[in-house]
Image (tube, grey):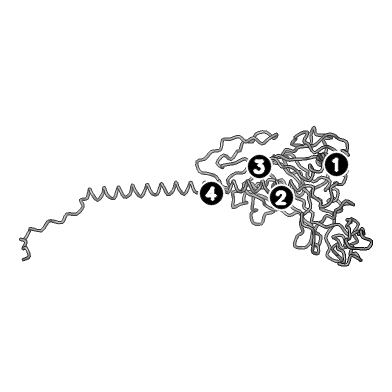
Amino acid sequence: MMPIHEPGAYPRSRGFTLVELMVGILIGMLIIAGLAVTFANSSQSYGEMQKQSQQIENGRYAFDVLRDDLEHAGFFGARTQLPAVPGTEPNPCDFTTGALASAIALPVQAYDSPATSPLACLSDADHVPGTDVIVVRRADPLVLTTAPTANQRYVQASASGIEVQAGNPSGFALPALNSDNTLQTVGTKADGTAATVKKMMNVAGASPVVTIARVAADIRKLHVHIYFIAPCDRLASGQTTCTSAADGGTPIPTLKRLELDVDSGGNAVLNVRPIAEGIENLQIEYGFDTSPTSINPATGFRGDGVIDAYSKNLTGVGSGTFAEWPNVMSARLFLLARNPTPSAGFSDNKTYAMGLEGSYTPTQTSYRRHLFEGEVRLINLSSRREIPK
């Protein structure tokens, strides 16, 4: 039988009191506030990690691009001997074939911490005062195997000589031999005219047994790269130089280079190419081979490939003129990279050692920075002077 409860015998239901409810709400708010602070701190830390990761990646990439180009400076295919140094200092902004032919005598040409742009093709507004400018000249490692681009600049070089030519597909012929080795296709210059720089080739299986065939030397694209630090990355709409409106109103210093190319109309030009943003300072010092000054019979070159002096510029090195640039055997790079955006509550009070240039103290202290430094051997210039063992 089910028990019968008398009226009033059931336990009374009891809810939260007002004080308990308020305490519960307060505890919940404290928990939510703690989670919000944790989330905010975590987001800020993640953002800072992203900034630093981008800074390091940009710095490494900028260093690698410079190192790769400097290691290839002075490469002109089968040609080992550079042309004689011209009587006047080459103008890196002159891309006529005659001027380029004279300038390749200086695979590296530099300007030490100029207060204003040292070049007519680089405006003051696009150059950060006090940062180095360096010009690198070399040929492309790939041999031309198709018709050249009109007005592109090419190098045709061998032991018999070296020329800079403007491309012209009309009449162009690649150097080759017929399959039976009985006839030659001599090949042409990049401009389609008869080749004057040729190479020697042994023709196997011909009669007599060894026949010397003279065919046009290989043709390669000529690279001229002018590296500099610009105060911005992306120009403001309608602008042709860096202004305060660049990069959305917060200009980001950027490693850029002018590079020899052709425009959409087929005209030879120096195009601006951004390399890595956030690069605030670039300083370079050079290792010069200054002795012996006489030609070494073992190599056919002056010097011995050993660095005798380091210098930021040509003052006190050999003749002290631009004619010393072919004697550069290595380069020490000092490259300062910073975050693209400032870090809240951070202050950079460091002083950065930039080699022979001295110390550098940033004026904008709310950015995190990292200094990249290292030495690059100019392989094509130094290895030619090494004395065989």
Give the mark nearest the N terminus, 1 or 3. 1
Q: Distance between the residues labelled 1 and 3?
A: 35 Å
Q: Is residue 197 left or right of residue 231?
A: right
Labels 2, 1: front one: 1
Badges 4 and 2: C-beta atoms under 8 Å apart? no
User: Foreground: 241 or 50?
Assistant: 50
Residue type (three-letter) at the residue carrying disc 3: Leu
Residue 322 place in picture, x, y as percent: 82, 40
Q: Mark 3 points at which residue?
A: 335
How many other residues sit within 10 Å of disc 4, few (<14), some (14-19) or many (≥20)?
Answer: few
Q: How far apart are marks 4 and 3 (CA)?
A: 20 Å
Q: Mark 1 points at which residue?
A: 299
In the structure shown, which secondary structural element does the residue marked by tag 3 occupy?
strand
Badges 2 and 1: C-beta atoms under 8 Å apart? no
User: Foreground: 278 or 203?
Assistant: 203
Badges 4 and 1: C-beta atoms under 8 Å apart? no
The picture quadrant where one finds residue 290 is top right
Q: Is residue 154 left or right of residue 117?
A: right
Badges 1 and 3: C-beta atoms under 8 Å apart? no
Q: Name the residue under label 4.
A: 50
